[in-house]
Amino acid sequence: MTAIKTVPFDAAEYLDNEEAIAAYLSAALEENEPALFLAALADVAKARGMTKMAQDAGLGRESLYKALAPGAKPRYDTVLKLARAAGVRLTVEPIPSH
């Protein structure tokens, strides 16, 4: 039997437009886990290009890496800048009744 060769999944390869980015970040937000959302935002930054994402957000490249590092707790305004740089915005909606 021939072995099947697999490669690691890289979400950044599929985040090539704002609709895909919005869906990906929305799914991460639904999990209600800040670390997961920041990891998803890091995937988006990788897809967009870290340098370009930092420039578009008005951040230094090193600041971007620090903000998205595992365990980081970036400021709210930093998250908003990164969302805008990714071509999306965060919105608020009512929680559905159970």
Image (spheres, rainbow, N blue to C red):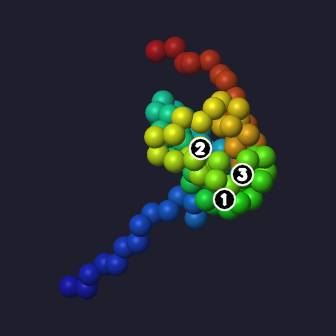
Label 3 SS: loop
**Image position of 97 (left or right of 60):** left
Cα gap from disc 1 to disc 2, whole angstroms: 12 Å
Q: Which of the two discs, 3 and 1, labels the residue nearer the N terminus?
A: 1
Residue 96 image offset from top left, x and y in percent: 55, 18
Q: Is residue 39 visible?
A: yes
Q: Residue type at mark 3: give it.
A: Gly
Label 2 SS: helix
Residue 28 image offset from top left, x and y in percent: 52, 40
Could you classify mark 3 by the number of other residues whose Cα lies within 10 Å: few (under 14), some (14-19), or many (20 or more)? some
- The front one of 94 and 90 is 90
Residue sitting at x 64%, y 53%: 62
Could you classify mark 2 by the number of other residues whose Cα lies within 10 Å: few (under 14), some (14-19), or many (20 or more)? many
Q: Which residue is mark 2?
A: 67
Cα gap from disc 3 to disc 1, whole angstroms: 10 Å
Q: Which of the two discs, 3 and 2, labels the residue nearer the N terminus?
A: 3
Label 1 SS: helix
For this orientation, the residue located farthest to the bottom is: 2
Residues at discs 1 and 2 in contact (Cβ within 8 Å): no
Q: Is residue 88 visible?
A: no
Residue 95 image offset from top left, x and y in percent: 56, 18
**Image position of 33 (left or right of 14):** left
Residue sitting at x 57%, y 60%: 12
Q: Which of the two discs, 1 and 2, labels the residue nearer the N terminus?
A: 1
Q: Give the label on residue 60, or none.
A: 3
**In this view, 50 is above or below 68:** below
Residues at discs 3 and 2 in contact (Cβ within 8 Å): no
Q: Residue type at mark 1: give it.
A: Met
Residue sitting at x 66%, y 59%: 50
